[in-house]
Every structure is written in structure tokens, then in C-alpha cells.
């Protein structure tokens, strides 16, 4: 668990981030209210915000009516919690939205506007999962069924089921 009292420095623009308490999710998130409008989620917190039915009213209210500095999203960012280089990842098989993930502490940074885009991608977690499975089926054909069965029985991993698991880990 990250120290929830520590003020974070925005990994995109270097300004101090503001802690917003989200009652529903019982956690703090860090918002770059005086800089770029980016949001940092601690490990696993993002899961509480990525679906359409999960309220983000507090976040919207915090960002409402403000002007934010534009940042270069292609720039490599450093995790404000643990100092590791963050990795750029797409949020789904569609690959349209790129966010920064920290593999050190599990944190996730979203640029201004990305949260709502991610929420609009899929209605539910099931839809997101189904899209991954459809993608795997389409790209692997018959191998998919064999591997899926293979994956379920948890036998020794082959090279390809490793790829399968990577995709599953990344998107599900
Ligand atoms: Zn910022
Ligand atoms: Zn980190």
C-alpha cells in the first residue's frame, strides 16, 4: 500500500497533486488540479473507476471548469510513488487509449480526459473480457480452443500459452 498522506508530484507536469477522497471506493486518488489534469491511481484502485456505473462525480467536480496545461503523452514518466519508469500500455484490445502503468507499485496514471474515454470503451467488465477472448479466437483460430482448455487444466505452459496468459493478464 502506498502512503496515502504523501503528496505526489505529477509524473506528467511536475506539479503537486491534490488528494481527493472517494467515499464510495473508500480510497484517495491523486489529481493534478493545478497542472495538467492527470489522475494517479494506486495499485488496484483503478478497478473501482473504470466501469460506466461506477460514479466519478467527485473527480468530475474536481476537474470541472478548469484549464489544464497540455503535456506530451509520449514522454516516459517516472512513478511518483516508487520512482520506477512507467510503461505505456493500451487499456484494451482496441488499443486506442494509452496509459502509464507502474510495474513497481501497480500505480496507473491517466492524462486528462482519458478516464472518461476508458469508461466509454466498454459498458461492463464482461464486455471488456469478451473483446479479449474474441480477439484471441480470431487471431489464433483452432489453437485458441486447445490453449483455452490447456489454460484451464493448468498444465505446463507452452510458449504460446504464455502469450495467451500475457494477454489475459494485461486486459482482464
Ligand atoms: Zn500534471
Ligand atoms: Zn510505482
Image (spheres, rainbow, N blue to C red):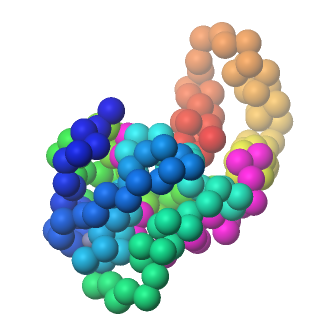
> Magenta stretch containing residue 97, yes or no?
no
In the rendering, at what x and y percent does residue 118 appear? 59, 64
**Residue 8 drawn above or below residue 143:** below
Relative placement, left or right, of 169 versus 127 is: left
Nearer to the camera, 31 or 138: 31
Relative placement, left or right, of 63 versus 7 is: right
Quadrant housing residue 95: bottom right
How many numbered tags mark residues here?
A: 0
Q: Residue at x 24, y 51 (%)?
A: 79
Q: Residue at x 34, y 52 (%)?
A: 87
**Magenta span of residues:** 106-126
> Magenta stretch containing residue 122, yes or no?
yes
Q: Which residue is drawn at 82% across and 31% down?
A: 145
Quadrant housing residue 88: bottom left
Instruction: Report ligand 1 position as a quadrant.
Output: bottom left
In the rendering, at what x and y percent does residue 124 appear? 74, 53
Amino acid at each position: 500500500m502506498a502512503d496515502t498522506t504523501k503528496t505526489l508530484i505529477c509524473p506528467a507536469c511536475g506539479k503537486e497533486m491534490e488528494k481527493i477522497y472517494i467515499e464510495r471506493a473508500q480510497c484517495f486518488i491523486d489529481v493534478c488540479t493545478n497542472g495538467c489534469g492527470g489522475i494517479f491511481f494506486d495499485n488496484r484502485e483503478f478497478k473501482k473507476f473504470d466501469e460506466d456505473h461506477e460514479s466519478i462525480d467527485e473527480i468530475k467536480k474536481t476537474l470541472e471548469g478548469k484549464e489544464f496545461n497540455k503535456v506530451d503523452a509520449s514522454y516516459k514518466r517516472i512513478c511518483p510513488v516508487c520512482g520506477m519508469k512507467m510503461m505505456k500500455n493500451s487499456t484494451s484490445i482496441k488499443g486506442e487509449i494509452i496509459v502509464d502503468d507502474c510495474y513497481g507499485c501497480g500505480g496507473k496514471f491517466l492524462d486528462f480526459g482519458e478516464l472518461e474515454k476508458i469508461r466509454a470503451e466498454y459498458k461492463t467488465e464482461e464486455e471488456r473480457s469478451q473483446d479479449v477472448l474474441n480477439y484471441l479466437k480470431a487471431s489464433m483460430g483452432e489453437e485458441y480452443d486447445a490453449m483455452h482448455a490447456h489454460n484451464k487444466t493448468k498444465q505446463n505452459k507452452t510458449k504460446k500459452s504464455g502469450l495467451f496468459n500475457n494477454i489475459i493478464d494485461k486486459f482482464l
